[in-house]
Image (spheres, coloured by chain):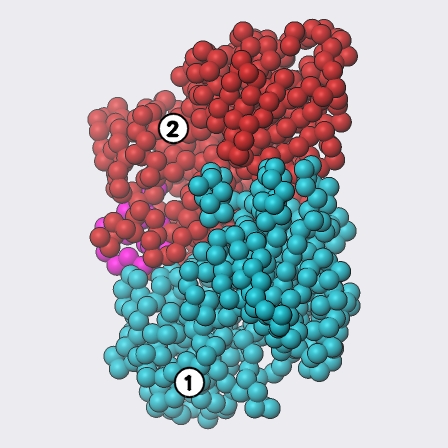
Chain colours: A red, B cyan
Amino acid sequence: MSQNHPVPDGHRVVIIGGGFGGLFAAQSLGKSGYDVTLLDKRNFHLFQPLLYQVTAGTLTTGDICVPHRVLLRRYKNVRALMSTAYDVDPQARTVRHEFGEVGYDTLIVATGVKHHYFGNDDWAEYAPGLKTIEHALRMRRRIFNAFEMAELEADTERRREWLTFVIVGGGPTGVELAGAVGELANRTMVGDFRAVDPRDARILLVEGADRVLPTYPEALSRRAQEMLEELGVTVVRSTMVEDIGEGSVRMKGPDGSETVSARTVLWAAGVRASSFGVRLAERTGTEPDRGGRMRVNDDLSLPDHPDIFVIGDLARCNDANGRDVPGLAPAAIQQGEYVAKLLKRRAKGKPDKPFKYTDKGTMAVIGRNRAVGDLNGFKVWGFPAWLLWVFVHIYALIGNERRLRVMLQWIWKYFTRKTGDRLVTGRPAKTRDIQHRHETG
Amino acid sequence: MSQNHPVPDGHRVVIIGGGFGGLFAAQSLGKSGYDVTLLDKRNFHLFQPLLYQVTAGTLTTGDICVPHRVLLRRYKNVRALMSTAYDVDPQARTVRHEFGEVGYDTLIVATGVKHHYFGNDDWAEYAPGLKTIEHALRMRRRIFNAFEMAELEADTERRREWLTFVIVGGGPTGVELAGAVGELANRTMVGDFRAVDPRDARILLVEGADRVLPTYPEALSRRAQEMLEELGVTVVRSTMVEDIGEGSVRMKGPDGSETVSARTVLWAAGVRASSFGVRLAERTGTEPDRGGRMRVNDDLSLPDHPDIFVIGDLARCNDANGRDVPGLAPAAIQQGEYVAKLLKRRAKGKPDKPFKYTDKGTMAVIGRNRAVGDLNGFKVWGFPAWLLWVFVHIYALIGNERRLRVMLQWIWKYFTRKTGDRLVTGRPAKTRDIQHRHETG
C-alpha cells in the first residue's frame, strides 16, 4: 500500500483490541468502503475509567461493559470476532488468532498495556492489578472478603492483618482505589459489623515519588493527599515496594525498610505492553520503551511499516509541545478517530495530515464527592471538581441506558452513602483466595 | 428448650442460609430479645426468581444481589457471618462452619436445595444448572460464547452444533430459560452477526411429562408451549434425557432414542437437598424425600427436635388442602416470618399456632412480554400476565434503588429490545469452557 493513493473498496482493515482506540476506529470506519474486522478476546467494550468503581461496589459490571456487537451493529462493513490475536506476519500481512488467521491491508493495533510487577511476576498472586473486569471482581472479592474475615477472626493480631490494606502506586488509579477503600471503611460500612469497626482499617497508599499523582501539578498532589487523609488513608511517599509475599509487604522508604502485615494488597503501579504488542515489536524489529509503548510516526504508523498503525496506550507519540501523549481514554479515542479519518481521506485521494492531540486534562476522584483535576493548566479540586468529573463521565458513557443507570447509582450513593454491589463472588467461600488457604493450612 | 415457655433475652438463634426464608426470619427477629446469627457462605442475598434474567443478559448481578449486611444493618441483635456451615450436633446444640463453631438454643435451617443430575454427576460439566449467581454467569458465558463461536466457525456442521441449545426440564425455570434464549436468537440479536443468522438457532426444551409446566393447569401449559413456539423454541415432551456428553445429548421419547449434537446444554431439571440439609438429616436420623425435602411438624420444627426449624425449599409441609407447600420464594418468606413470630410469641408466653401457607399463585415468563400465571385458580396469560409479573417482581425486589434500576432496565428492554449485559466473562477466551478444549484438541 503506498501512502497517498486512493484505496479501493474492499481494502481490509483489521483492528486488534476493542478498547477506546479500537472501538472508535471501528465505528469511524463504519459505512465506509473499507472491509473492517475487529478482533478482541472479549465480546464487550469496557469503560475502563470507571473500573475502580466496580471494585468498590459502587457500580456493577453491566454498567460499564457493552457488547461490541451492540456498538457495531449498524455498521454492516464491520464484523466483530471474539478471539485472541497472538501473532502477526508483516510481510504476508496476516494476523493469527485463536481460531484462525485473518489477512489485512491495513492493521490497527490497539491492544494497550497490562500491569506488570517489574520482573516480580510472583507478586501477581498476592497483589492483583486492575485492567480487566475480572481483575475488578477479584479486587472486589479481596476487599470485601477481608472485612468478612476480620469479623470472623477472634485473634486481635490476625484481625489487624485482615484490616490492613496496601495500595501500591500513587497514580490516578492508586489514588482512586485508596479513596474508595477509605470511603468504604470510614463511611459506607460503619455500623455494618458487630465484632469489628471498619474504621479501624489501616489503608496505606505507597508511592515511589515524593508525592501522589506525580504527573499532576504539585498543588493538586497536596490537595489529593489531604482528601485521602480525611478518608483515613495514610499516604506513604518516596517509598518503593521491595517484596510482596503472602500476607506481607516489604517496603523501603527514606527511613529504611519496613515490613507491613497486610492481607489485602492492590497493585496500581507499573504497566507494560500487551502480549500482542510485544509480539508486534518482535516481528517489526521495533523496541517498546520502558513503559511498554511503541514509538510511532506523525501519522501513528510504525516506522517502516506504513500499513501498521499503533494507537492508544500502546502508542508513544508527542503532542504539540513535544510531550508524550498520555495513556488516557480521550487520547485513544482521538487516535482511533484520526486513523479512521486518515484512511477515509486516502480513499478520496486527499493528502495525509499528522495526528494532533487535543489535551482535555486529567482528573482523579477521591471518595464519594471529591476530586482533583488539571484541565490544561486550570486546576480544580474538592466538590466542584467531583461534580465536573461526574458530568464528564456520564457524558462519556456509551448508551443512554447506561448513562441513566450510572447517574441514578451515583445520585443514590451521594444521598444515601450506600453502595449495593459489595459482592464476594467467583469462588466457593471455602477457598477464599490465597489468604484463607494460608489461614487453615 | 420446652415449647410453650417464655424464652429469655440472649437466647441464641442461629439461622443457616440467607435466602428468602433465612433473611426474612433474621429480619423479623431484628430488635427482638433474641441473639441472632445468620450464617451464609455468601455475603449477599440473591433474588433467585430473576436469576435467569442475568443468564439472558437482561439484568446484571448488582440488580438482584444485596449484601446481607445492608439488609440487616439496623438490627443490632443480628450478626451476619460469611462462612459455610457443614455440620451440626443436635445434642450439644452447635453448628460447625468453615471458620469455627457456633452454639444455638434455636436453629433455623434455610439452606434450600441444589440441582442434581439423578446420579449422573458427570453431566454437571456439560449442562450447568441455575442456583447461584456464578451458575448464572456460567450459563450466560455458555450461551453468548456459543453464538460467538458460530460466527467464527467455517464448517457448517460444527456451526450448527454451536447454534443448537438444549434446555433440560420444562418447569418454570426451564420455560423461562428457553423463552429467554428464543427471544435472544429470534429477536434481540438479529442483525448482530455477519456470518451467521441467530434465527437459525435450534432451541429444544426437553420435558419428561407430556406437557411443560406440569404443575400448572393444563390450559396454561398449552399457552406456554404456543408462546415458546412463537419464539422459535421446539418443545420436546414425554422425553427423558438418557445421557449428556461433550457436545451431545441422548434423549428417549415416545419414538425411541435420539442423539442431538449440541454445544450448549442447560440444566433445569432435578433438585436435591443442600449439603447442610443432608448432614442435618443424617444427624437427626430423618430421611429427606425424593425431592430432597425434609418433613416438618405443623410449627416447621423437625420431628423430635423442637429446637430445630427447617424452612424454605428444604422443608416439606402441607397447605390447608393437604397439598405440599411449593418451593417458591413467597412460601419461604412466609415460613421465615412464621418462625420468627412463633419465637416472639413464646418470648411473651403466648401459645404456639401452626404454620398456614397463603397461596399467592405462580407465574412463569416467556420472552420479552408474555407470561402465564395461575393465581389460586385464576388463570392469566399473554401480555396482561407479563404486566402482572413485572409489577409483582418489582414490588418484591429489595431496596428502592434496585426497584428503580430493574424497572428502568425492563422498560428499556421493552421498548428497544436491547439487552446490554451479554458479557462473556470469567475465563480467558483461550479456554472457552469445555467446548473449546474439545475443539482444538
Nearest the viewer among B139 and B389 is B139
Residue B287's image quarter? Answer: bottom left
x%, y% of residue B413?
Answer: 71, 52
**Kind of residue at disc 1:** Ser
In the picture, measured across the screen, residue B94 lies left or right of residue A52, that is left
Q: State which region is magenta.
A: A146-165
Reading the image, the residue beneath label 1 is B301
As helix, strand or loop, the secondary structure at mark 1 comes to strand
Q: What residue is drawn where x is 68% and y is 82%?
A: B376
Q: Residues within 10 Å of mark 2 (few under 14, many from 20)?
A: many
Secondary structure category for the residue under label 2: loop
Q: CA distance from mark 2 to mark 1?
A: 56 Å
What type is the residue that disc 2 sits on?
Answer: His
Queried whether the magenta region covers residue A159, the answer comes back as: yes
- Which quadrant is the N terminus of chain A positioned in? top right
> Mark 2 near mark 1, Cβ–Cβ under 8 Å?
no
Q: In the depicted view, which residue is nearer to us: B55 or A133?
A: B55
Vertical placement of residue B398 versus B139, above or below:
below
**How many neighbours does mark 1 have within 10 angstroms: few (below 14), some (14-19), or many (20 or more)?**
many
Q: Quadrant of residue B215?
A: bottom right
Which sits in the foreground, A349 or B341?
Answer: A349
What residue would you read off at disc 2?
A116
Q: Residue at x 31, y 59 (%)?
A: A152
Q: Chain of mark 2?
A: A
Give the residue at x 46% y 15%.
A283
- Count every numbered label the image shows and give the total: 2
Which subunit holds the residue at mark 1? B
